[in-house]
Image (cartoon, grey):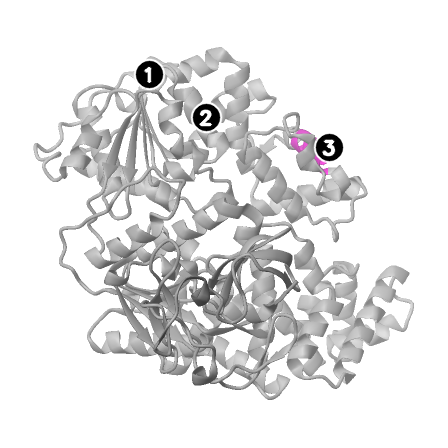
Amino acid sequence: MSQPDLFQAAPPAPRPDLLACLNEAQRRAVEAVDGPVLVLAGAGTGKTRVLTTRLAHILTLRRAFPSQILAVTFTNKAAREMRERLEAMLGGAADGLWLGTFHAIAARILRRHAELLGLKPNFTILDTDDQLRLLKQLLDAAGIDERRWPARAAAAIIQRWKDRGFGPEKVPPSEARDFANGRLLPLYAAYQERLRTLNAVDFGDLLLHNLTLFSADHAVLGEYQRRFRYILVDEYQDTNVAQYLWLRLLAQLHRNLCCVGDDDQSIYSWRGAEIGNILRFEKDFPGATIIRLEQNYRSTPHILAAAGALIAHNAGRLGKTLWTAANEGEKVRLRGVWDADAEARWVGDEIEALQRRGEALAEIAILVRAGFQTREFEERFITLGLPYRVLGGPRFYERQEIRDALAYLRLIHQPADDLAFERIVNTPRRGIGSTTLQMLHARAREEKVPLTAAAERLASGDALKPAARHALARFLADLDRWRRLDLPHPQLAQLVLDESGYTAMWQEDKSADAPGRLENLKELVAAMAEFETLAGFLEHVSLVMEATAESGGDMVVLMTLHGAKGLEFDTVFLPGWEEGLFPSQRSMEENGQAGLEEERRLAYVGLTRARRRALVSYAANRRIHGNWQSAIPSRFIGELPPEHVELVAEPGLQPRVHDRIGGDAWSIAPGPGRAGFRTSFGERAVPRPYAERRPAPTAEGQVRGVPVRGAELRRIGGFSPGDRVFHQKFGYGIIGLVEDNKLTVTFEHAGEKKVMDSFVEKA
């Protein structure tokens, strides 16, 4: 370690008003420079200001040189913003400061000591494509069928192991059984060995190799422990196990670790984030100072009260209460609609009204729980001529899986569509490689025919190798058979996706985005039902794509709730607050109570993105996987405090407050009857007009003016708590609570779920 790196000239003195702009809690967080400190920074409470001011304060006090301070963030953007703010505060550069992302800092350390790990300092950091290419080679060498066990799925599992600090020798055998019949563990070891041979690492290796280095060489660990007198961490609630272990090792000597985060905004467990890191901070660092930043500078009192009441239902939190000195503002608006199309129409009308009042479109956001929800909004905005952009991902019809599915349909509709043919001839893989495709193009140019015609001629000759020839012939036969089928086009689309193997390809993919891609495909099939013919639908898509290509300038923002963290808008729409969609049924089934609490944190994040107004909506009916279902309003709606919520509903969608064990909650009566719809089990069901439906008890416990009390009230409809029932999907269970036509049932194998009474029968 060279002297110039440790001892540099102190930075210029900061402005005298450095601390004057801070509130009392922020100032305490800045001035608590000794020992471990956890700053619980609620949404919109100025955490970035606290972090940068704390850095400037330490440097001003001459407690450390810049080269003795480590500040880590999660994104390059956050690191860049922090450095710019710091230099503005100091009036000059703080050269030597270790400020960057976890991966950037870990890479810097690793390059200094690469030889100790069998690497050279100029090692390559593989991107995702190179990583997948290497894994495909290893899968092939091991005789593992990559179509059944995709390289992308293997990469995702290996990354999760690295996020938890597991090298090949530390992975519990029980965790390696699901992929390729337990063959992933030796594949992981072979992958790591191959990386060393190539003098390369992947992103997961950067921290994993740091942990290996620190554990194996105490001299190296001691060097960095002595160097970093102060460590600051942003977004601590998003750290994974490897990052947590890395920070603990580095902070052991001086213990001047300051972590800033919000346990109520931990929403990335699927990416490896471990909320327990922030919840057990005091246990990990005895004597730690805990400072809560609770004054919010973003949202109105009504929004903060609604979000606070919602998140208070989580047990796994350290607790804080956000407040603001701002004016009261608008209440959170809760809107009931008939279906997703009505929801999109309402949102479009509201946005146009805001635009007429002079509101900027860029200050309006629609935050959805699942990517497939964007389609209705995109199509409605195109109809209205409202410019929009999808942040954090492509527009619905630009997504890979949608383009692939459309290519199949285009080729069935128009056999001469060469672009569609080329896109899907080997998707999923059929053994039709680049050599075969080159021969197809050559034959097509030579004979001046489409690729489909060229393929027919090559498949009937002997120019191709037998395997490629047979694969091509099977593909052409499938296309011909699909064209001759006399089916409604939505059913044809589903059949093509299934029989082509395209659906199975994503079902077998274990990557985090595979479930979302499957949901998008189901949404595509559902959207086709709105058009009379396949040709009409394909023309509509072409016009949509043309219209979106021309948009620019001031635009409404469409994005997922996960992508919205860290952003803020004047107006936020939160659609789809229904059980099974939000909270996500899959999240609850896979992670139980922890999954539910993370879903609630996601709802909290959504509400706290709004500065001036938040609008929540739910649909009484929603098409799920192509089938119409009656939707149950989200339990999160029942957790919003009525005094901070303004109820608005379409005629016939009757909002009310009703008595519920554990306190008052919102409940939404179904709307007027319309055309019949299909349940998730394929049974035909026709909604009854509202006046004919089973009446609902009011807050006073009355049904059509007749007092009803106690068990009598809960038995309306023939079900009572304690009844044993059978559900076609979830099996047998016991009713715990009856709320109008909604039952809370604890199933023997599926756990607790809310279901409509029409979907169960007494056992």
Q: Give residue 210's position: percent from left, percent from top.
A: 50, 25
The part of the image, by quadrant, that contains residue 38 is top left
Q: Give residue 553's position: percent from left, percent from top.
A: 32, 69
* Left or right placement of residue 281 versus residue 540 in this view: left
Dot 3 and dot 1 residues touching (CB under 8 Å): no
Q: Give residue 695's position: percent from left, percent from top.
A: 43, 76
Q: CA distance from mark 3 to mark 1?
A: 40 Å
Any mark on residue 254, and which? 1
The part of the image, by quadrant, that contains residue 279 is top left
Number of residue marks: 3
Quadrant placement of the C terminus: bottom right
Q: Taking 438 as reference, is 130 above or below it?
A: above
Location of mark 3 (residue): 186
List the single residue furthest toward the top. 219
- Disc nearer the start of the sequence (2/1): 2
Q: Indicate yes or no whether the magenta region holds residue 188.
A: yes
The answer to whether one can see residue 198 in this image is yes
- Disc nearer the start of the sequence (2/3): 3
Q: Secondary structure at mark 1?
A: loop
Residue in the picture at 61% in, 70% down: 680
Any mark on residue 544, and which? none
Q: Taking 473 as reference, is 186 above or below it?
A: above
Q: CA distance from mark 2 to mark 1?
A: 15 Å
- Badge 1: how crowded within 10 Å, few (<14), some, or many (20+)? some
Q: Which residues are magenta?
A: 184-194
- Badge 2: how crowded within 10 Å, few (<14), some, or many (20+)? some
